[in-house]
């Protein structure tokens, strides 16, 4: 089993994925959208099933967010 987070594009059609992601949020309010995102994380984490890979993904996502949107006053 590969225990490294795969960072290269692995989707056959990124545009179709993006459409699917944005369409899933259609007509949801902010709270529902956040809940949908949380459900997706849980479902996909369960599918991945490797805590080492998931730790890498969470860390990478956090760094990306912090770089894009620094904490005010930091």
Image (tube, rainbow, N blue to C red):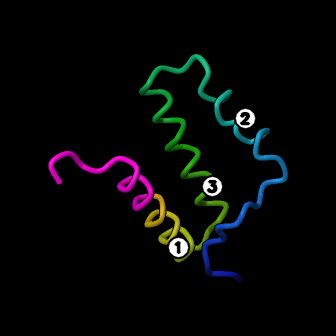
Quote the CA–CA distance across marks 2 and 1. Answer: 26 Å
- The residue most toward the top is 27
Q: Work out which quarter of the rendered image holds the N terminus and state it.
A: bottom right
Q: Answer few, some or many: residues within 10 Å of disc 3's Cα (few below 14, many 20 plus, some between 14 and 19).
A: few
How far is the residue under mark 1 from the one under mark 3? 12 Å
11 lies left or right of 30: right
Say whether disc 3 or disc 2 marks the residue closer to the N-terminus: 2
CA gap, disc 3 to disc 2?
Answer: 15 Å
Under circle 2, the secondary element is helix
Q: Which residues are magenta?
A: 62-74
Between 63 and 34, the one lying in front of the other is: 63
Mark number, residue 51:
1
Q: Is residue 73 magenta?
A: yes
Please report the residue visible at 44 percent of the width from the left and 57 percent of the height from the top. 64
Q: Is residue 71 left or right of residue 32?
A: left
Q: Counting other residues with Cα less than 10 Å from the Cα at mark 2, is it few (<14), some (14-19), or many (20 or more)?
A: few
Label 1 crowd (10 A; few <14 / some 14-19 / many >=20): few
Do tag 1 and tag 3 residues touch (Cβ < 8 Å)? Answer: no
**Helix, strand or loop for disc 1:** helix
Q: Tell me where residue 66 appears, x and y as whole percent.
A: 35, 55
Mark 1 or mark 3: which comes first in sequence?
3
Q: Nearer the viewer, residue 43 or 69?
A: 69
N-term mark: 2 or 1: 2
Which residue is found at the position 15% from the left and 48% from the top?
73
Q: Name the residue tied to disc 3.
A: 44
Q: Nearer the viewer, mark 2 or mark 1?
A: 2
Q: Quadrant of residue 11?
A: bottom right
Q: Residue at x 76, y 46 (%)?
A: 14
Indicate the quadrant where residue 8 lies: bottom right
**Is residue 63 in the magenta section?**
yes
Q: Which mark is residue 20?
A: 2
């Amino acid at each position: 089993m590969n225990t490294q987070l795969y960072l290269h594009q692995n989707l056959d059609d990124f545009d179709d994925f993006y459409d699917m992601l944005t369409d899933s949020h259609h007509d949801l309010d902010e709270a529902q959208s956040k809940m949908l995102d949380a459900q997706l994380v849980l479902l996909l984490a369960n599918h991945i099933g490797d805590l080492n890979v998931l730790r890498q993904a969470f860390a990478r996502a956090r760094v990306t967010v912090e770089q894009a949107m620094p904490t005010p006053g930091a």
